[in-house]
Image: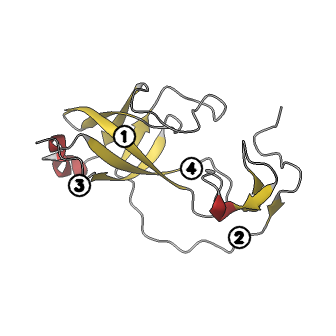
Amino acid sequence: MLVEDELREGEVTVVPPPPNDAGLVFIGRIRTPWSSRSETPRQGRHDGPVCRLEIFEPWGQALQGIDHYATLDVVYWLHQSRRDLVLQRGHHASGVRGTFSLRSPLRPNPIGISSVALVGVEGNTVLVRGLDCLDGTPLIDLKPDRCNHSL
């Protein structure tokens, strides 16, 4: 079994340049049932467990009207991912491939995007199905799926 930060055969790392502050503001925290990467599904499913998007103040008002949509895109920061891999061996891929040719969470800017099914809204908490991230993952943004308006 592979240790979480252990390299697989053929994988290559680099020393990344120092980060430039992009000015990101986390708008909330994601609550899921998964506390380790080994437990987390590789892809979220719309029939998966209900997860909670806890929206921080002052962003709660920005949820107004979100319940008009059946699906949302959730953008989040994969805060426990390594950022130095340029060549990786994908989970089910044969051979080594470049990071940008994989959907791996291990990337220079570990931003995750999931299309989720909206279950409901309770105050500043959005209930969704379809996530594939760790409990406590920082939330960057929510965007409605404009092609899937529920009204």
Measure the alpha-carbon separation of dots 3 and 4: 28 Å
The dot on residue 151 is none
Residue hosting label 3 = 146
Measure the alpha-carbon separation of dots 2 and 3: 36 Å
- Between 38 and 59, which is closer to the camera in this rendering? 38
Q: Residue 70, position in %: x, y? A: 23, 39
Residue hosting label 4 = 79
Dividing the picture into quadrants, the one containing residue 51 is top left
**How many other residues sit within 10 Å of disc 1, few (<14), some (14-19) or many (≥20)?**
many
Q: Residue at x 23, y 47 (%)?
A: 148
Asked whether disc 1 touches disc 2, contact meaning CB atoms under 8 Å apart, the reply is no
Of circles 1 and 2, the one toward us is 1
Q: Which of the marked residues, 1 or 3, is nearer the chain's N terminus?
A: 1
Q: Residue 31, position in %: x, y? A: 42, 33
Q: Which of the marked residues, 1 or 4, is nearer the chain's N terminus?
A: 4
Q: Is residue 60 left or right of residue 11?
A: left
Q: Which of the marked residues, 2 or 3, is nearer the chain's N terminus?
A: 2
**How many other residues sit within 10 Å of disc 3, few (<14), some (14-19) or many (≥20)?**
few
Q: Secondary structure at mark 4?
A: loop
Q: Amino acid at mark 1?
A: Val
Q: Amino acid at mark 4?
A: His
The dot on residue 116 is 1
Q: Residue 82, position in %: x, y? A: 68, 54
Q: Secondary structure at mark 1?
A: strand
The dot on residue 16 is 2
Q: Residue at x 83, y 57 (%)?
A: 11
